[in-house]
Image (cartoon, rainbow, N blue to C red):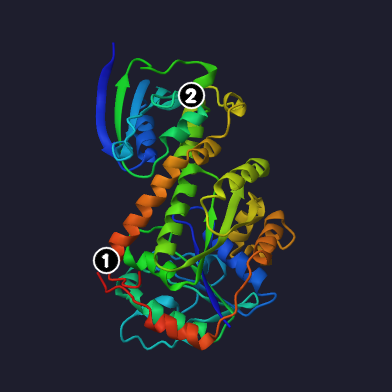
Amino acid sequence: MTELTFARVVDDTAAALSLALDRELTGHAVLTPQDALLLDDDGAGVVAFTDGVPTHVHHTETGRGGAPALASLAATGPLRVECYAGDDGSVPRTDRTAVAPGTPAERLAGDDELAARTRDAARAADIDDADANDAGDPDAVEAFLADEQKVEAIRDRAREEARERAEEWGFDDL
Amino acid sequence: MVEAFAVASGKGGTGKTTSTLALGMALAEDHDVTVVDADTGMANLLFHAGLADVDVTLHDLLIADGSAAVSDAVYERYGMRVVPCGTGLGAFRAADPARLRGVVADLAADTDVLLLDSPATLASRSAVLPVVLADRAVLVVQPTIPAISDALKVQEYATSYGTGVAGTLYNKVQDPEAVERVAAKSGKYFEGETLGTVPEDDAVRAARRAGEPLLAHAPDSDAAAAYRRAADAIDVRDADAESVADRFRSAVVPEQP
């Protein structure tokens, strides 16, 4: 039976993955970037966890699985995390959706320390640490870069932020 | 002539300080180079350059009514002039980052290339200041989605404030072929060229532990060679030193929060 164990908005994906790891979540988490609304994109990432270790990833909007699904999730900024203990939600545990334990922390959060902690937890829980499952997939970073709309949205937002802050900070040479 | 580069990343842990000193040493073969630790909140260049015990640092130059002269904080090391920043919290609180403009102007009057090791954040006025003051930014990125996203953000800030982009340097690279593909795909978003890819290398950690810049500690390492190639890819532009110094002096600088 699915049980919503907690839901909150966190600053970034590292915080989301860290939450699941610290709580040793076995079940799944739904990660919804807060700017999904701004981007007019209602996609969410669903990540299956075993003992806090991410094992399978699926993206609801793009239908991607595994490492490429991480690219669909890439967005700087806050995201809403809902954790459900007990089942895998909409993530099928197949080779297509499988990720190595440290991959989400490395590629999505860029957090080597978190990736190392996750791998340690994977070893403790006897979860396969082989990267073999990702090897055949297009690289998540390349998939991210291929998503022109998403990358341009990040750039547009940064330019807007720079302009707003210039005013706030007293730069007047724009 | 002088051109000021902000070595920036937008994200911590990309090897920015290692890169600043390595590019500095490589560029010093053909230019007079001054390296400044402009990351006044998280200074660490002093540990990389064997300057952990020095008395006077950039912090002393940023204190209102401080008695230190700019030259007191300049150390001739490894064929460059190095201006470290201190790590004391008290000194950081007392420091007025806006004074960086005057310090940079003074240093610019007497060098070919100024490299500003910039904060790994865009969260405050003082963190963005080195990028505002520089002519161009060198973006140091790891081939991860967040590092690339953050570098793009730095680029958009830089260009919004009239600072160009000299190029992108991929660092801590484990799979060069994959990064070639990533660099090819990211090229359409980044201004400037891909300056190079620096491999993950144990020599970098060894140099850091030894308190020496990589190019001094392990000049024959693969990473050192990659940094030299990257430095060669940077075409330093001529500019009149006085006009550049004037520009720094007149640059609009944020008030203290």
Q: In which quarter of the image is residue B39?
A: bottom left
Tell me which chain the residue with mark 2 is part of: A
Where residue B10 appears, as percent x and y from the top left, is 44, 56
Q: How far apart are marks 2 and 1 (CA)?
A: 42 Å
Classify mark 1: residues with Cα within 10 Å, few (<14), some (14-19) or many (20+).
Answer: few
Q: Are marks 2 and 1 on the same chain?
A: yes
Mark 2 falls on what kind of element? loop
The answer to whether residue B12 shows anywhere in this view is no
Where residue A49 appears, as percent x and y from the top left, is 41, 23
Tell me if residue A6 comes above or below residue B165 in the rendering: above
Q: Which residue is drawn at 47% across and 84% down?
A: B245
Q: Name the residue under label 1.
A: A167
Q: Considering depth in this image, is B210 or B191 the residue closer to the camera?
A: B191
Q: Of callouts 2 and 1, which one flags the residue occurring earlier in the amino acid sequence?
A: 2
Q: Which residue is drawn at 32% across and 76% down?
A: B96
Q: Considering depth in this image, is A128 or B184 the residue closer to the camera?
A: B184
Tell me if residue A4 comes above or below residue B230 in the rendering: above
Where residue A132 appears, as percent x and y from the top left, is 61, 25
Q: Name the residue under label 2.
A: A65
**Tag 1: amino acid:** Glu
The number of callouts visible is: 2
> Which is closer to the viewer, label 2 or label 1?
1
Q: Residue furthest top?
A: A1
**Left or right: where A38 falls relative to B169:** left
**Left or right: where A82 falls relative to B207:** left
Q: Residue furthest right?
A: B220
